[in-house]
Structures are given as C-alpha cells and as structure tokens.
C-alpha cells in the first residue's frame, strides 16, 4: 500500500489533491481511500489530507502515521512532525524555492516551486495540481492520463484546462 499525507491550509486544496489522486487510482482499477482531518474549520487553518492506494481492497480506515510520501503545500507548515510522519525511506515533496533548507533534515527530499508555476498558469497561488504532477513524476503510482481524467471528472469545467496544464508542467519539471 502507498500512503500519502498532504499538509496544507484550509482552502488551499490539500484534500482536493488527496481526493483527485484517489479518483485517478480508480480509473486504473486500483483501490483508493482519501479523507481529511482538520482543526478549526476555517480558511487558512492546518489541514491534513490522507490518500491510501493499493491493488487490494483497503480495510484500514485510520489516519496515516507512517507515510511513504509527505507532501507540503505551504512550506510554513514544515516541522519535525512532518519528518516524523514519514517511513524510514519516505519521501518529502515540498513547495519551496530553496530546497537546501530541508536537505539536512530529510534524506529523501524533493522541492518544487509550485507557487511560481501556479501563478504563471492559474494566475492564483493554488498549488495542489502542481504538487500532484510532481508526485506522479516521483512515484508513478498512477498515470498522467488517469489524473487528467480525474481532473475532468471532479473539477468544474472552467478549471479543467488550466489545471491539466499545471499538472503537466510540474510533472515535466521534476527531475528524479
């Protein structure tokens, strides 16, 4: 089973990313479970999204405490707790302009300036589909086509084209 924790802020798309990844897995006949957890229900509050992907039916519906991937949508949310939430060989994917700040803290870290990409393409600092593209490039858990289909199925029609463009741009920009 592949387990992913999304670290974001309310209204920033962390749970949407978790859900889109689950929908994409279903397009490939995989099982998926996506769910959020959050404190105060307000924009800007800490939100955790969880995605579980597997070839077999997922029976464990508990929060993820040891993830294969931790994806940080807002680098101000980075803390030792993010690192502690990873399995020993887990990968940290973080939205940052400067990855050097994190290399000493985590042995498997990949950075992407998702905010700049999102501002360029969406004209808004919404980074969830950018980080989904980076996650796909790193993990190969689902195909790019499956995630495009998930975006088409799950997002408003007016958002689809630009989000697919952002997904592809981030997918192509990650060097692994």
Image: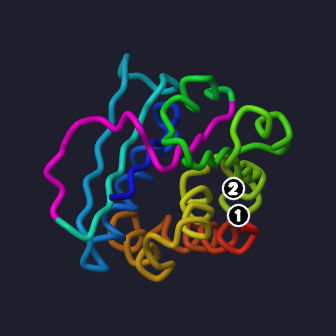
Residue that label 2 marks:
118
Is 37 colored magenta in this rendering? Answer: no
The span picked out in magenta is: 57-75
Magenta segment, principal secondary structure? loop
Q: Residue furthest top?
A: 40
The answer for how far apart the CA atoms under marks 2 and 1 are is: 5 Å
Q: On screen, 82 above or below 124?
A: above
Q: Nearer the viewer, residue 137 or 56?
A: 56
- 25 relative position to 94: left or right: left
Q: Quadrant of residue 75?
A: top right
**Residue at 36% of width from left, 44% of height from top?**
50
Q: Position of residue 86 (x, y in %)?
A: 51, 39
Disc 1: which residue? 121
- The percent coordinates of residue 25 (x first, y second) are 33, 70
Residue 68 place in picture, x, y as percent: 47, 50
State the colouring used for the structure image: rainbow
- Which quadrant is home to the N terminus? bottom left
């Amino acid at each position: 089973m592949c387990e992913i924790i999304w670290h974001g802020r309310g209204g920033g798309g962390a749970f949407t990313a978790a859900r889109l990844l689950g929908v994409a897995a279903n397009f490939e006949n995989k099982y998926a479970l996506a769910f959020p957890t959050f404190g105060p229900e307000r924009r800007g509050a800490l939100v955790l999204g969880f995605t579980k992907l597997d070839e077999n039916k997922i029976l464990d519906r508990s929060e993820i405490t040891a993830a294969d991937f931790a994806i940080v949508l807002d680098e101000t949310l980075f803390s030792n707790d993010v690192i502690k939430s990873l399995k020993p060989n887990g990968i940290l994917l973080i939205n940052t302009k400067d990855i050097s700040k994190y290399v000493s803290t985590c042995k498997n870290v990949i950075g992407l300036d998702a905010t700049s990409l999102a501002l360029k393409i969406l004209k808004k600092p919404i980074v969830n589909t950018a980080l989904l593209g980076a996650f796909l490039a790193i993990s190969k858990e689902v195909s790019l086509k499956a995630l495009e289909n998930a975006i088409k199925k799950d997002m408003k029609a007016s958002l689809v084209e630009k989000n697919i463009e952002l997904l592809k741009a981030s997918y192509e920009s990650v060097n692994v």
